[in-house]
Amino acid sequence: MKQYKKLLAIFAAAIMLAICFAGCSGASTSAARDTVYNSSSQYAPMEEYAPAPAATSPVTSNDMGFDYAAGEATSVTAGDIYAGRKIIRNYDISLNTDKFDENMDYIKAKVSELGGYVLSSNLYGSKPEAYGDAGRNIELTIRIPAEKAGEFVSGVETLGQINYVRDYTDDITDEYYDTDTRLAVLQEQLERLRAIMVETDNLADVIALEDRISEVMLQIETLTGTLKRYDALIDYTTINLSVSERNAITGPAATKTTADRISEGFTDTLNGVGVFFVNFFVWFVSSLPVIVIAAIVVVIIVIIVRAATKKRSKKKAEVKEESKP
């Protein structure tokens, strides 16, 4: 009996080992959010906003009616906010709302009013119509003139229940002025090279000067593009906004009888049980290699233990026979 208990314990340990291996192979990590807090806030009354002047840069539209600006930033006053330093400011905001459509109208009008634009928009889900429907979610990347970003954020924070607001900056003053200095040096060098080229008559010198002028012009173009990109990031604050629609709390579910709701709940539970067994089957099949290896190890251990037990029993029997008179 003790032998069977030992074998059972060994087999159980091998199965647990297989489960651990399978679990480790499917583990994943998740990133924690930075600043998270929950607070319930009242919705600001929705007002009618007069349409803002049309943008001067080419635009396209998505399904939500947001405008995507294709031109570059034109504001030149952002540097005054940080006393001449070159600061890139960003916001990450997440909120829940039960006035999804009204809030989207507000955001669209506010972006246009402040002279900003929507860089990207990702809408998924559907409008909740029955109790428990998940609702819609939208993720927006919005660009607002830096001097007006605070006004936009303050307005957005009144639209629903805030999940988190993250405000962070990047000081690129050194990189900016270093690039600007290098650009000025290259421009002076380009002028000198062109002056030398006008004065020389040597064909080899002319060819060498043309090559060098091309290199310098390419570097100037690259640095100029870098400065323009810096200016765009500085002059316009980037706001990553995530809006989630709350589940419906009224609707067709209110007219259902208790029996109907119990029946639906029972069906959902059965579906959940079915999903569990399907997931278990998938795990079992995917873990078969580990389980087979563990089973082989168990069989080997069982054979060794049984052989040792028989040998020990035989030896005891021999000793007992020898001890008889």
Image: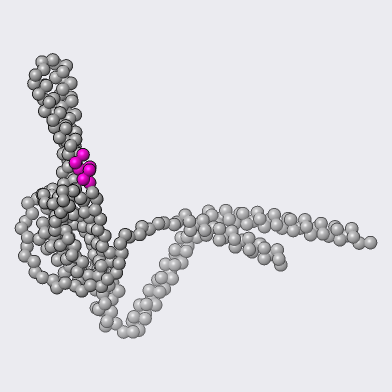
Q: Residue furthest top?
A: 202
Rendering coords of residue 317 (x, y %): 83, 60
Residue drawn at the location 28% of the way across and 66% of the way down: 163
Residue 239 locus on image (x, y percent): 21, 57
Can residue 120 be seen here? The reply is no
Please provide percent x and percent y for residue 183.
16, 35
Q: Position of residue 155 (x, y in %)?
A: 17, 66
Residue 228 sits in quarter: top left
Q: Residue furthest right?
A: 325
Residue 147 image-quadrant placement = bottom left
Horizontal relation, residue 13 to residue 63: left or right: right
Image height check: is 91 above or below 76? below
Q: Is residue 202 left or right of residue 279?
A: left
Name which residue lies at 27% across and 81% down: 254
Q: Please name the residue shown 74% across and 58% down the image.
A: 309
- The quarter of the rendered structure image containing the N terminus is bottom right
Q: Relative to 173, say whether 161 is above or below.
A: below
Q: Please give left or right for residue 229 compared with residue 6 in the image.
A: left
Task: Say which of 89 and 256 sits in front.
Answer: 89
Please determine whether, in this image, residue 132 is positioned above or below residue 7: below
The answer to if 174 sits in the magenta stretch is: yes
Magenta residues, start to end? 172-178
Q: In the displayed image of the protein, which residue is found farthest to the front?
A: 83
- Of residues 39 and 285, the one drawn nearer to the viewer in this rendering: 39
Q: Please tell me whether the stretch drawn in magenta is mainly helix, strand or loop.
A: helix
Where is the C terminus found, in terms of image quarters? bottom right
Image coloring type: one colour
Q: Is residue 222 magenta-colored? A: no
Residue at 16% x, 16% y: name it: 204
